[in-house]
Amino acid sequence: MSSSPVASNGCVCDEQRAHDLLRRMDATRPTATFKKVMALTSVGVFVDAMDVYLAGGVKSTLVDTGFATNEQTAAFLSAGFLGLFIGSLIAGLVGDVLGRRKAFQFNLLLFGIATILGALAPNMTFMIVMRFFVGLGLGSELVTSFSMINEFAPIAMRGRWCAIGSTIANCGSPIAMFLCLLFITMWSPLGQESWRLVFVVIGVCAIGVCIARQAMPESPRWLIEHAKFDEAEQLIGCIEREMRDAGLEPAKEVVSEQVAMDSNSHLARNLFLGIVMVIGTSLTQYTYTTFGPSILKSVGLATQTSLLSTTFTLLAAPLGALIGALLIEKLGRRVEVAGAFVWVAVFAGIYAFALGSGSTALITVLGFMMTIGFYVLNASVISVYVGELFSTKYRFRCAGICQGSGKAVNVFMPFAVTWLLANLQPSVIYFAIVGVALVAAVITIAIGPETKSRRLG
């Protein structure tokens, strides 16, 4: 590699010990320790996915019941993305400097408490403030979760495992919309304020996951990077014992040559690429999913019909993530990501024309197809590719900058979409999605390095 992975006095013995520990870590296979990491990270992002679509699901209800104005709901959504932006940056710095576990410890607790307080909100101003703290707590979730899986997963199947985590996590999307459909339109024990129950359910789930995460181990790669060799030795030795007990042989070395991500000379390029891909993924996805019910209502659908249509389209979330998981090691990162962006552009363009057809079935099917593309991107960009672009030394903070950039753009998205819905045709929103997706596809295929089956620096 171009630089030593040891943050110490640089003596030869430390460099050799670091090399040996990294080699042993590269040879590990999935064991109980890895499965624990996989479960604790995936369930956290599952709660994150539920929350994202909860906001879009209750938005129209808050306006219809007079609890909020359109401008206030835009501020509500924007406050969440602002919190996500700041939380992403903080998590990246904490994860690289103080350790991966510390970045995990309090984010879901903050999210859970703020969500429950939001459910008790006396007015919309209080809800907007709580939404900021919800975002602050969740901002670290995507940064920490998939980077953690990335550092524990076996090299040959790293992309597959990260994408499987995304598949599990994104089952939360349709479940969140179903909760909105259940409590808001089908069973309303609190009348017009039954949306509060959805917040309570998700907040309690987040606190439960936070408690379970106290068992999360530290990343051996971070320990090695910071010259904590004895701790790394103990954890890697535990994984190796689990392998022997399970009758698993060490994994064969897949590749040993240097690649773009091994050298910090490519840091600026990879950071630019990561920012473009994350903005392309999050801006297109959140624009559609957050405003889907509102846009359908604007073209004449009833509240229950719009929620039902959106719930069905979000069944494509775990399907898209699963497709991404199955193809990520076959197609490679660049081809899958660029292809998914083109897929989104094609179906967003068709969807824009279909909005005026008056056919709920056609709109729903096209939304389903578009959503598949969103979640192939989610599984490949957010879960896999971004974390592989950077060395261990910079992985969390650079992933945090990429994730934060996507959230920063989305701070302004609710106001822009609200204005467009008030002044222009809804189809304009989907033509904008087409443009963003095509630009991201071109940049990815033009400068993206292939990181499939490559050693993490």
Image: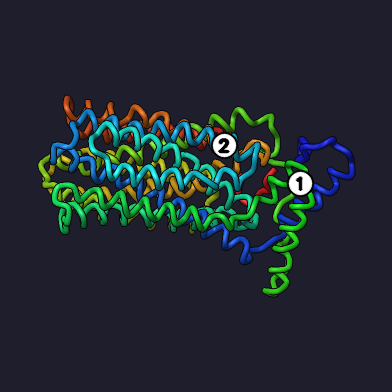
* Residue bearing the label numbered 1: 228
Q: Which mark is residue 61?
A: none
Q: Nearer the viewer, residue 453 or 321?
A: 321
Label 2 crowd bin: few (<14), some (14–19), many (20+), radius 10 Å: many
Say which label, 1 or 2, has the lower sequence index.
Answer: 2
- Say which amino acid is labelled 2: Gly
Residue 327 visible here: no
Give residue 267's quadrant in the image.
top right
The image shows residue 399 at horizontal and vertical percentages of 55, 37
Image quadrant holding the C terminus, namely top right
Is residue 387 shown left or right of residue 287? right
* Foreground pick, 133 / 220: 133
Q: Can you identify the residue that label 2 sits on?
A: 92
Q: Secondary structure at mark 2?
A: helix
Q: Residue at (35%, 37%) from the top-left corner?
A: 130
Q: Residue at x 63, y 62 (%)?
A: 33
Residue drawn at x 50%, y 55% as measured from the top left: 211
Question: Which structural element holds mark 1?
Answer: loop
